[in-house]
Image (spheres, rainbow, N blue to C red):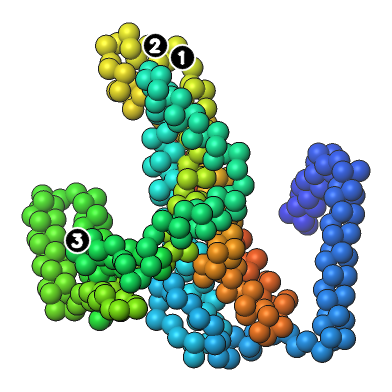
């Protein structure tokens, strides 16, 4: 009985303590907003179902198994017009991901270079980079894409019959860049070789007297396996110039080039300003302290300024990367086969607007959240490394 009494008294104290801590008015306000939001969502769902029923539009994802009949010349995976809508959407999503990765890498390197150039003591280099930033930062990305595609690439590059021939069987014309293609016959073998090679970095963390010998043996076996695969499981396909066309090899389309160059140039201007303001946001006294200790200006930048500037740079840099991913949808204006164009074609052919839009939104949302998660992890790691 005493145990029951003590337990009830303890629970009463905890409940009273909880009620004293919370604000009743604030709690009721939050619950009211939550129920209003739930009512609004349920009303949208109910209204959508009624409208779909009146228009005799069936919902569901069964249409994804149907034949697509969509031409995707830029597909990085095996695809034909007889493939399903699922494979068409996956191909468009992969094109969006690859474009985003290439543009993020290129714009980051170019933006870092421009930022350091604007901070240099060279007057001419400063002004040229400032003009570059002001031009591309104040132009809409769609205008840059259209100008680069219609005004430069299609006007400068020759037709197929007069293709520019470069060494290593590389041809450039109005249809894009044709280069040799390396084909892998057994992807699973290459995947296993990459997994085996990644074990090299795991073994490095194992502390034992024979660690160096194990590392050397593992590295030799992995490299020997990769070399064997390269000679027995791959073949090189060279492009061949014919009268009115180029067959074989890998074609990097003009649409891909225009979108890649436009987004890289536009985003690099924004990234350069983000990096420059981050570097200038570091206290000058810390830089002067490093110089007074006898460190060279390059070492001060690498060891003191940049690690501290990363805390200022990374959060806005995340927004630039997310915006770049969303800007890849502008490729629809020049016919690049990214997710937006493929989804729009699927919507027009199947009339499954609700399902396609949900796939559409979910894909871009997932990519943006993945980038945000990685950048937030990098930001926390940077803060943790400096004792914050």
Question: What kind of element bears circle 1?
Answer: helix
Circle 2 crowding by C-alpha within 10 Å: few under 14, some 14–19, many from 20: few
The N terminus - image quarter = bottom right
The spot of residue 357 in percent (x, y) is 68, 72
- Is residue 289 found left or right of 318 in the rendered image? left
The residue tagged 3 is 167
Quick check: 196 above or below 85? Answer: above
Question: What kind of element bears circle 2?
Answer: helix
- Residue at 54% x, 68% y is 335
Circle 3 crowding by C-alpha within 10 Å: few under 14, some 14–19, many from 20: few
- Residue at 59% x, 70% y is 341
Quick check: 44 above or below 51? Answer: above
| First in residue order: circle 3 vs circle 2 | 3
- Is residue 249 found left or right of 123 in the rendered image? left
Quick one: 142 or 287, which is closer to the camera? 142
The spot of residue 114 in percent (x, y) is 42, 33
| First in residue order: circle 3 vs circle 1 | 3
- Is residue 113 found left or right of 168 in the rendered image? right
Q: Judge depth for marks 3 and 2 and give the one in front.
A: 3
- State the CA–CA distance, disc 1 to disc 2: 6 Å
Circle 1 crowding by C-alpha within 10 Å: few under 14, some 14–19, many from 20: few
The residue tagged 1 is 284
**Residue 309 visible somewhere in the drawing:** no
Quick one: 232 or 237, which is closer to the camera? 237
The residue tagged 2 is 288
**Residue 75 visible somewhere in the drawing:** yes
- State the CA–CA distance, disc 3 to disc 2: 51 Å
For this orientation, the residue located farthest to the top is 292
The spot of residue 146 in percent (x, y) is 56, 56
Determine contact: label 1, label 2, CB under 8 Å.
yes
């Amino acid at each position: 009985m005493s145990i029951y009494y003590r337990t009830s008294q303890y629970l009463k104290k905890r409940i009273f303590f909880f009620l004293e801590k919370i604000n009743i008015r604030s709690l009721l306000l939050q619950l009211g907003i939550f129920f209003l939001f739930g009512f609004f969502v349920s009303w949208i769902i109910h209204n959508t179902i009624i409208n779909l029923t009146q228009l005799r539009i069936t919902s569901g994802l069964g249409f994804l198994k149907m034949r697509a009949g969509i031409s995707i010349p830029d597909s990085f995976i095996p695809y034909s017009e007889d493939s399903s809508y699922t494979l068409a959407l996956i191909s468009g999503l992969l094109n969006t991901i690859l474009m985003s990765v290439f543009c993020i890498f290129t714009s980051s390197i170019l933006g870092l270079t421009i930022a350091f150039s604007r901070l240099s003591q060279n007057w001419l280099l400063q002004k040229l980079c400032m003009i570059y930033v002001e031009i591309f930062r104040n132009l809409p990305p769609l205008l840059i894409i259209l100008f680069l595609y219609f005004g430069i690439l299609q006007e400068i590059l020759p037709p197929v019959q007069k293709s520019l021939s470069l060494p290593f069987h590389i041809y450039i014309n109005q249809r894009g860049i044709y280069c040799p293609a390396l084909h892998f016959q057994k992807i699973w073998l290459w995947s296993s070789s990459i997994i085996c090679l990644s074990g090299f970095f795991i073994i490095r963390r194992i502390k034992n007297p024979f660690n160096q010998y194990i590392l050397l043996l593992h590295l030799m076996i992995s490299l020997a396996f990769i070399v064997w695969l390269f000679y027995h499981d791959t073949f090189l396909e060279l492009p061949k110039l014919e009268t009115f066309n180029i067959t074989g090899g890998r074609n990097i389309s003009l649409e891909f080039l225009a979108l890649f160059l436009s987004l890289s140039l536009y985003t690099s201007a924004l990234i350069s300003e983000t990096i420059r303001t981050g570097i200038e946001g570091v206290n000058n006294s810390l830089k002067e302290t490093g110089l007074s200790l006898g460190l060279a200006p390059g070492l001060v930048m690498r060891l003191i300024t940049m690690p501290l500037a990363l805390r200022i740079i990374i959060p806005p840099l995340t927004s630039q990367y997310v915006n770049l991913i969303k800007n890849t949808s502008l490729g629809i204006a020049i016919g690049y086969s990214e997710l937006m164009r493929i989804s729009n074609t699927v919507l027009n052919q199947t009339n499954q607007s609700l399902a396609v839009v949900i796939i559409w939104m979910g894909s871009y949302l997932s990519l943006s959240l993945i980038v945000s998660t990685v950048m937030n992890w990098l930001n926390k790691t940077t803060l943790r490394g400096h004792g914050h």
